[in-house]
Amino acid sequence: MRTVISLKNLRSQFVRDVEEISGEDLLACNQCGKCSAGCPVAAAMDMLPSQVIRMAQLGMTEVLQSRTIWICASCLTCVTRCPKGVDLPRLMEALREISLRAGASEINLDQLPPDLVRELPQLAIVGGFRKYIK
Amino acid sequence: MMKIPYYPGCTLSTKAKGYDRSGRAVAAALGMELVELPDWQCCGATFPLATDNSMALIAPTRVLYQAEQTGEQVAALCAICYHVLKRTQTALERDPAMRERINWFTEQEYGGRVRVVHLLELLRDSLGWEELARRVVRPLTGLRAAPYYGCLLLRPYEEIGLDNPEAPTILHDLIRALGAEPVDFPYNTECCGSYLTVKDPTVSETLSRDIVASARAAGAQVLVTACPLCQFNLDWPQRETAFGRTGEEIPILYFTQLMAVALGLPEEDWGVEGMYTDPRPLLRNVAQAAGAVPHPTPPPSAAGEG
Ligand code: SF4
Ligand code: SF4
Ligand code: SF4
Ligand code: SF4
């Protein structure tokens, strides 16, 4: 993949939006990779958590297409371990929010297995709907 | 009896009734009456991570306001209710302007003073493990129980502060106080997939199977949790399907259910009906072996190990 890194992208509206919604300073991350090493869901991701924040730093809006931002379970393992105090789950939420506010919807109600829906605890439904649809 | 305002939350009032039942029963057996808040609503089940939108803080703030009308603290059993309420309380404490904004919207003056506690915290800090051990009438001798903490009970430490987020001991200590043997296993703070179970069930099933397999490999006979979503996620993949069962299932228990057995409560108070992996054969065996209290129902012939 060819990527042009430019000052224009580094200071784009997208970067400002991500920083505002997440409340995080993206450049605090020094790409040590500790978050990716310990992420329990990494195996199901198309892009590692540390790669997601790298792309956000560079203003690459392609990161919104990544499956990772929807697979992150907000388990808060990475923020517990990040040596730079970066709250990656907040960044993931910001990227989800940007997509949700633009009309994305990640749960297809018709495709949920009926036996699962009958059994799911209430908090999974309430919480899941809040996280993945608007 | 000491009265403690209690927030059951929606899941403990419906799907996880056994957690509520056993929780109230063991608290009462230890001299604490969990008094349900007179008027409460769902906390929303997620703490909002976006900082530019305070809407999701409204529901938990209403709960805190209800609690403030009753007393100085509110106890929860659901680890996720606890997480959401505690983080909301911390957020409003650190940001008085936010509290004002929410109060303006709800037209309820939340003063910001409620202490959110988990029953585990009360057991450790108010009662103490030694005292709990003294109250045990059916020591769970020989039972190998693996404490499973999950995520939201412990993290983020700066806002929750219940226990060490990387090497917690609170459930270990509880299990030991009940006379059982806490089994360490490497996945005890790994995520079970949480809400992914609604969106990508295969992902959370994979995570959950790994957790249960890891506990089994370490020799556990049961897993012990404080979260109804953990309980569901870990137990659901063990359910009976068209292919039957693998025979490798182990019960996924709430810590209160284990306590109910050890404190000598009758089986109705264990709250163990309707779980995908039936813990009753094993628990009856353990209770029978401890023998201190005559058992209401005869043990089944095909009892589990223990
Ligand atoms: S652990 Fe922190 S500093 Fe290291 S790559 Fe992840 S976010 Fe960046
Ligand atoms: S919060 Fe998300 S990115 Fe961080 S460790 Fe958990 S699943 Fe991975
Ligand atoms: S966290 Fe859940 S179980 Fe607890 S009240 Fe909220 S939605 Fe319900
Ligand atoms: S282990 Fe799962 S349900 Fe339990 S607290 Fe973590 S994410 Fe939640």
Image: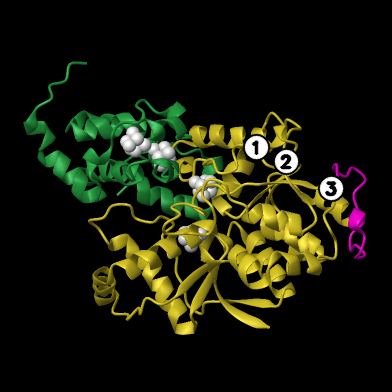
Chain colours: A green, B yellow
Task: Kindly identify the amino acid type of the residue bearing the numbered disc 1.
Answer: Val
Which labelled disc corresponds to residue B212? 1
Mark 1 vs ligand 4: CB under 8 Å?
Answer: no
* Circle 3/circle 1 CB separation < 8 Å: no
Asked whether the viewer can see residue A59, the reply is yes
Which labelled disc corresponds to residue B38? none
Task: Kindly identify the amino acid type of the residue bearing the numbered disc 3.
Answer: Gly
Discs 3 and 2 carry the same chain letter: yes
* Circle 1/circle 2 CB separation < 8 Å: yes
Q: Quadrant of residue B175?
A: bottom right
Q: Which residues are magenta?
A: B288-306
> Horizontal placement of B90 versus B100: left or right?
right
Q: Chain of mark 3?
A: B
How much space separates mark 1 and mark 2, taking CA atoms? 8 Å
Relative to B183, say whether B291 is above or below.
below
Q: Chain of mark 1?
A: B
Asked whether the viewer can see residue B265, the reply is no
Q: Earlier in the sequence, mark 3 or mark 2?
A: 3
Quickly name the residue at label 2: B250
Quickly name the residue at label 3: B142
**Ligand 1 image-quadrant field:** top left
